[in-house]
Amino acid sequence: MSDVEDVWARILTYAGQEFRTVTGLPFTYEVPGNYLRVSRTNRNLSRANFEKAIELMPAEGPGELRGRQGASYTWAILMDSRIRADGW
């Protein structure tokens, strides 16, 4: 498993760039604090949400992120090659 600090640093690095959900919907996010604000929803996704989701990586799809907020966005970000790097 990748170090949470390393993954969070990559999440910060790629804020504002386009990501895609499993169904191909494009979105971006910003990180105004210890959470992400996703462009396609009013929901904020906390850093703790990502820390817990990292424990489930690699996941086949968002459905495997049981109990995580914004699973489709969380999965899309964590499974993107820019974020996961060599972690999973």
Image: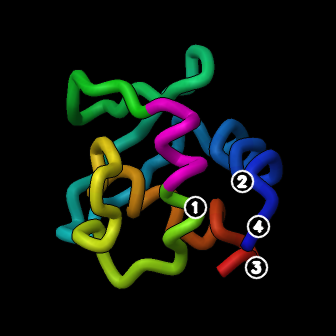
Residue at the image position 21 percent from the left and 57 percent from the top: 25
Q: Are marks 1 and 4 in contact (CB under 8 Å)?
A: yes
Percent of width and height locating residue 67: 29, 52
Mark-to-mark CA distance, 3 and 1: 13 Å
Question: Quarter holding the N terminus?
Answer: bottom right
> Where is 27 relative to 87, above or below?
above
Relative to residue 21, is residue 17 drawn left or right?
Answer: right
> Where is 49 relative to 6, above or below?
above
Q: Which residue is mark 3?
A: 86
Examine the structure image and report whether residue 69 is included in the region drawn in magenta: no
Residue at the image position 61 percent from the left and 16 percent from the top: 33
Q: Which residue is mark 1?
A: 54
Residue at the image position 23 percent from the left and 66 percent from the top: 24
Q: Are marks 3 and 1 in contact (CB under 8 Å)?
A: no
The residue closer to the viewer here, 88 or 17, is: 88
Sequence-wise first label, 1 or 4 = 4
Relative to residue 66, is residue 88 drawn left or right?
Answer: right
Mark-to-mark CA distance, 4 and 3: 8 Å
Please state the total of marks drawn on the protein image. Answer: 4
Q: Are marks 2 and 1 in contact (CB under 8 Å)?
A: yes
| Mark in front: 3 vs 1 | 1
Question: Quarter holding the C terminus?
Answer: bottom right
- Amino acid found under the numbered disc labelled 2: Val
Q: Which residue is mark 4?
A: 2
Mark-to-mark CA distance, 3 and 2: 10 Å
Boundaries of the magenta span: 46-52
- Amino acid found under the numbered disc labelled 4: Ser
